[in-house]
Image: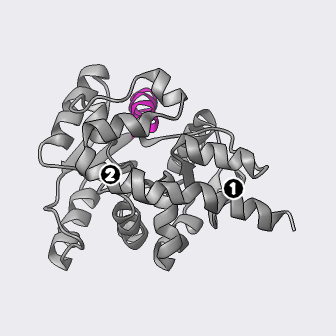
Amino acid sequence: MHPKHNILGIQVSSISMTNLLADFAGFIRSGNKASVCITPVNSILAARKNAQVLAIYNNATYTLCDGVPVLWASRFLGTPIEERITGLDLLPALLAFCASHNFSLFFLGASPGVGDALKAKAELLYPSINIKGVYCPPFAAKFEKAENDKMIAAINAVQPDIVLVSLTAPKQDIWISENLAMLNTKIAIGIGGAFEVTAGLINRAPLWMQKAGLEWFYRFTQEPKRMFKRYFIEAPIFIPLVILQKIRGSK
């Protein structure tokens, strides 16, 4: 098992992309199930306010470090996380991984047409890739039982090895937690907005901004109205809380 480190009460996985994908192969071949949450700063802060989300992140098989501030915090606290693994990095790696190992995928969520665009892009890049299905549910804060049953049935009809869920966090993580036991799949991953970026519908920040921890600023310039609260109201709370955890932890 990989180690996990405490960041504001959330147990964040310390693992490399290489070892994560190797673990995925093990789950698929063994028939065991795994849940994967991807946690940037806003997800960690949301979990502090919601006991259900906190429990989901702390009980997930993998709770990945998405965000340079989370990586920095782990180092500051003296428990460095091995690697930052964002949804935007994981999805392209997964496409190549599944194509080379003949593992199958299912795309659930995002806006209408996005999953189909991602499927087309993936099949262009990897002609042998096995994408068993795409399903885009209607937008809802919580799905009605009939719609939820329809989502489960669509997945179970084709039995993919991996289900990628793009419903935004923490909604996607709650959905996986509540439904994984009923899904005929091995791995369910809350992948966030990676569908749009990987499909080429939205640009990602330049590499230098990613490495400098400025990817958030690039995203803000792309969607200022949607991202303002996340980056300028919620995120500034993170650093003082990490400092407080360091002080308390040193006593």
Q: Is residue 244 left or right of residue 110?
A: right
Give the magenta part as a residue range. Answer: 89-103
The foreground one among 29 and 222 is 222
Could you tell which of marks 2 and 1 lies nearer the N-terminus?
1
Secondary structure state at the residue bearing disc 2:
helix
Cβ–Cβ under 8 Å for marks 2 and 1: no
Task: Identify the amino acid type marked 2.
Answer: Phe
Camera-nearest residue between 162 and 32? 162
Q: Position of residue 120 (x, y in %)?
A: 19, 30
Residue 32 seen in this snapshot = no
Q: Residue at x 38, y 32 (%)?
A: 95
User: Is residue 164 one of those drawn in magenta?
Assistant: no
Res 4 label: 1
x and y, in percent, of residue 126 in the image: 32, 23
Mark 2 and mark 1: span between their CA atoms? 30 Å
Instruction: Name the residue carrying label 2.
Output: 228
Q: Residue at x 46, y 27 (%)?
A: 209
